[in-house]
Amino acid sequence: MRRLAAAAAFAAMFIGLFVAGSGVACADEYPSRPITLIVPFPAGGPTDTLARLLGEAIHQSLGQPVVIENVTGAGATIGVAHAVESAADGYTILIGNWTSNVGSAAMFPVKYDLLKDLVPISLLTATPLIMVGKNALPAKTGQELIAWLKANPGKASAATVGAGSAAHVCELYFEQQTGTRFQVVPYRGGAPAMQDIMAGQIDLMCAEASQTLAYVRGGQMKAFAVMAKQRWPALPDVPTMDEIGVPGMYISFWHGLWAPKGTSPEIIAKLDKAVMQTLADPAVRKRLTGLGAVISPPSDQNPAALAAFQKAEIAKWWPIIKGANIKVN
């Protein structure tokens, strides 16, 4: 009996060592199956476009397919919650932006903590917001626009793409910083808002700059100022808010990559390395810059930089959102 017990104990120890060793091997071999990239926005939008481009390149870098899963609704909070609740094994990651990973959690009743329940991987790209308007507006410059709005308080209309969206918050911020006032008109998306500006049905919009690029270049609407420290390379003739006399007014439509809390540092490092390789690829850079995106410098393509940036964005924008008492439908 003692011999049998000893043999059983030895077998158990051997199996335990084998399983443990297999676990280490599996971690070393990550990824060994497809990775799901959650996009908390509908297909066809700027975040989805970036996700698909990034997914193709990461597939080449890591050798496993990246499956795009659009999980939408409730201001992107459903998609973020899905990522938070996923297994922390590196096979489910999240691409997010200002709306999903800053703005929405200030308005919707969420059960997660953006800074505690997700692990940052990398800061990807940013596109500034830009104030555009219909061609029939009498103002030709940013300074003239502010003067015209002050002379006509409450008369101008400005489109948004939903309560608490970056466009909405940008317009509230613009009013605060310039001492102007206008009517906010909600739209279901950027495309119909752009159409109404070109048709002269609405006066203004603080829009993601890439949405406006073709229309501004085509002379179908005016661009007054970009909300960034530097001019936007895609429209270098459009001044910054600093240059038109409103210093420090910056808001960008930025993107980052996260994993569920508990994902191992080794897996995060592999994903970050794949992102850096992807964003350094000349073909990828050409496609992204062609879409108007500004790629984060290599020094910011890491978990620490994204964590610090997101924390600063939440500290900046949550008081503005909550102070405006924005209501969501």
Image: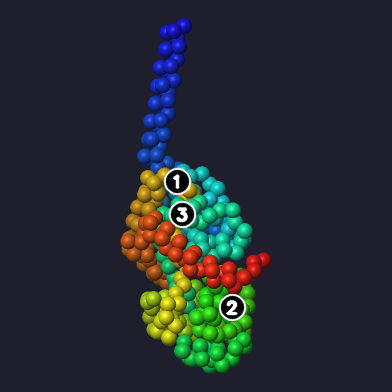
203 lies left or right of 236: right
Give how far apart the Cα atoms at labels 1 and 2 are: 40 Å
Query: Badge 3: few (under 14), some or many (20 or more) residues near its Cα, within 10 Å?
Result: many
Mark earlier in primary sequence (1, 3): 3
Q: Is residue 113 visible?
A: yes
180 lies left or right of 19: right
Q: Which residue, given by chain and number where applicable, does mark 2 sit on?
A: 159
SS category of the residue bearing label 3: strand
Give how far apart the Cα atoms at labels 3 and 2 are: 31 Å
Q: Indicate whether 147 appears above or below 242.
A: below
Give how far apart the Cα atoms at labels 1 and 3 are: 10 Å
Image quarter hosting the C terminus: bottom right
76 lies left or right of 295: right
Q: Amino acid at mark 1?
A: Thr
Q: Which mark is residue 258?
A: 3
Residue 242, by quadrant, is bottom left
Query: Badge 2: few (under 14), some or many (20 or more) residues near its Cα, within 10 Å?
Result: many
Q: Amino acid at mark 3?
A: Trp
Q: Which residue, given by chain and number where applicable, does mark 1 sit on?
A: 263
Q: Indicate whether 30 appears above or below 16.
A: below
Residue 291, by quadrant, is bottom left
